[in-house]
Amino acid sequence: MIGATTTDNGANGLVRLFLLVGLGVFALFPLVGSTFYVQLGTKVMVFAILAMSLNLLVGFTGLVSLGHAAFFGIAAYSVYFFTPGFTAASVWWTLPAAVGLAGLAALVIGALSLRTKGIFFLMVTLAFGQMVFFLFHDTPIGGSPDGVYVNAVPTFDALGIDLPELRDRYQLIEGGARAPFTLYYVTLACMLAVYAFLAVLLRSLFGHVIKGIRVNEHRMRALGYPVYGYKLASFVIAGLLGGLAGYLWAVQSLFVNPELAGWHMSAEILLMVILGGMGTIYGPILGALALEALRELAEIAIEYGVTASNAIGLTEMDPHRAATDYYLLVEGVVIIAIVIVLPRGLSGLIEDLAAYLRSGRRSAKGEAEQAT
Amino acid sequence: MSFDVFADPAIFLVQLLNATQQGLLLFLIASGLTLIFGIMGIINLAHGSFYMVGAYAAYAVAEATGSFWLALPIGVAAGIALGYVLERLLFRFFYERDHLYQVLLTFGLILIFEEVRGMMFGEDTHRALTPEALDFSIPLLGVQSYPAYRLAISVICLLVALGLYLLISRTRLGMMIRAGAYNREMVQALGINITFVYAAVFGLGTGLAALAGLLEAPVASVEPGISGRYLIISFVVVVIGGIGSVKGAFYGALLIGFVDTFAKVIVPEAAGMSVYLLMAAVLLWRPTGLFGRPA
């Protein structure tokens, strides 16, 4: 049995404190971070949304999908479809349309895939994901197998007032003031909204039913719940949220390629979910953050290592190239280490720590009471 | 869309032979995958990496010794040994764990295989030597001719398929494999050394994938990323044929070989999607595959 080991969605006090501190760090980060790291932060939050959406399936409904990147890719490509030339389109219709397309795809793919179970479901979602990959890779719809540029940032206005452009600017505004990192804060707001939405959803009757399906599908069916419908609804919601992430990704990078929908991407999202821990709503955020941090740290470590071994004449490599070349080796080893030693992910570690601190305090309090 | 392929019987025959060869190669890969699924319940995304091991072994050994026939046993042995060692070191700890963790474990292995390949062979594209004895073409109808080596691939694959059939249906090991696929616990309870059967099946499966890589190396490029060349499509074969069914893998692989080859000729821009559409159609009709046991 996989999935939640703790009864999440009512995070306890210590965990809640941890989350609030984390939120503060996210909110204040652009005040201190360089443009490069703020853009990286936006990317991390986009992946956090994507991983949270997959976690609804994997961690809470018990459906291991290996084709989730398809919905990410479809929404990302939609931004390209909706801005064919250099004319920007408004966020207010492109966002719902892109997310809607992803949801529609999830409805069709889910309706077919959910006829199967377990390992079959995994492989069928994998295959459908590849079908979407080839749709963008081979057919004229996708433009080019190497990817295409989105030429205009969607316009973002409210009640006739132009809001700042949806970008994390590259340079400081005149006079040393910081550029408004609009996209960063829009993405942060989206991430919080997705978190809140999932928290409410999982507390609702719907949430209890899908969690019941994860634990014992037959019993839920015997209780009279239309299990297929609930699973499909969960699949479509996950697809919609994954689409939101895809839209934000396309707006940030202004470039989309078939790999966004490919199975390597699906596996990476799954990795974020597991790394963060699938029993909790916030786990995948940690996973997305940790994976990006790992990438940065590993590249820095490899660069230093190669520079050092060059200096003593052991190797003759370009440190920067070695970092990008060998990063995946580090990632591979780390993935295997995680599945072996940390199956409940980082949030499992945090929950354990919180439980330990709580029990420690309780026993200390008990001893104090006994002493008096 | 163009149906010219059906107009000229010679071109049609060439495509027919190509489809058969691709289907049979696919069978070598998918049969290992389906056996490993069926008996150990392991979903092995790194299966394609053994195809890569075979292809690079063909290139490296043939380059070093000048003999393709020497590369064949060495490459297959490497595939079997590597599979056996990984089963003992890693996979056996994952039999009872959720498929989710198996997916991640094997995804991690793919990355490691690919990086080690990069360190050993670099990022250039290579091609293995065609064995000299088979380096000629056989004339077909009219002006068309067909490389003898490509025909030899099909013949070797058919012989391997026959051997696999005999192994599974006629030998004691085959009996254990069939029983293991049907009911693991019962086989264990009867006192059969399931540990050995598992390691043997794993080595057999990875050896077959390596053989496919070896055989195809002289006619397809040996390059970075080839571990993914047949990976997903062999999963589709397993889904279509039914998990654990070698017979299903055989017919499924041939079906995919034909659909893929002819789709590339008839509708090139949608060829990549064709096999997945086929899979969707099969699943609508039979959710457990053509030869799968109903769940």
Image (tube, coloured by chain):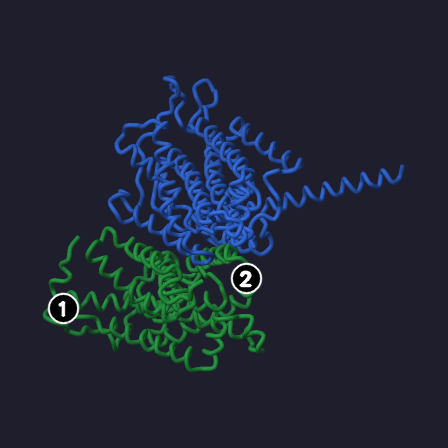
Give the percent coordinates (x, y) of residue A259: 37, 47
> Residue at 51% across / 28% down in the picture?
A30
Horizontal arrangement in the rendering, residue B168 relative to residue B185 (left or right)? left
Give the percent coordinates (x, y) of residue A47: 47, 40
- What is the chain letter for disc 1? B
- What is the chain letter for disc 2? B
> Residue at 29% across / 69% down in the picture?
B129
Q: CA distance from mark 2 to mark 1?
A: 51 Å
Secondary structure under tag 2 reads helix
Give the percent coordinates (x, y) of residue B157: 32, 73
Question: Which chain is represented by green in the image?
Answer: B
- The residue where tag 1 is placed is B144
Write down the quadrant of residue A252 in the picture: top left
> Count of labels shown?
2
Q: Mark 2 is on which residue type?
A: Phe
> Residue at 55% across / 59% down in the picture?
B97
Crowding near the residue tagged with mark 2, few <14, some 14–19, many ≥20 C-alpha atoms within 10 Å: some
Which disc number belongs to residue B171?
none
Dot 2 or dot 1: first in sequence order is: 2
Q: Can residue A210 be seen by looking at this rendering?
A: yes
Q: Residue furthest right?
A: A372
> Residue at 34% across / 69% down in the picture?
B250
Question: Which chain is represented by blue in the image?
Answer: A
Q: Residue furthest left?
A: B142
Q: Can residue B227 be seen by looking at this rendering?
A: no
Decide: marks 2, 1 in contact (CB < 8 A)?
A: no
Q: Mark 1 is on which residue type?
A: Gln
- The residue where tag 2 is placed is B94
B171 relative to A340, above or below: below
Quick check: do tags 2 and 1 share a chain?
yes
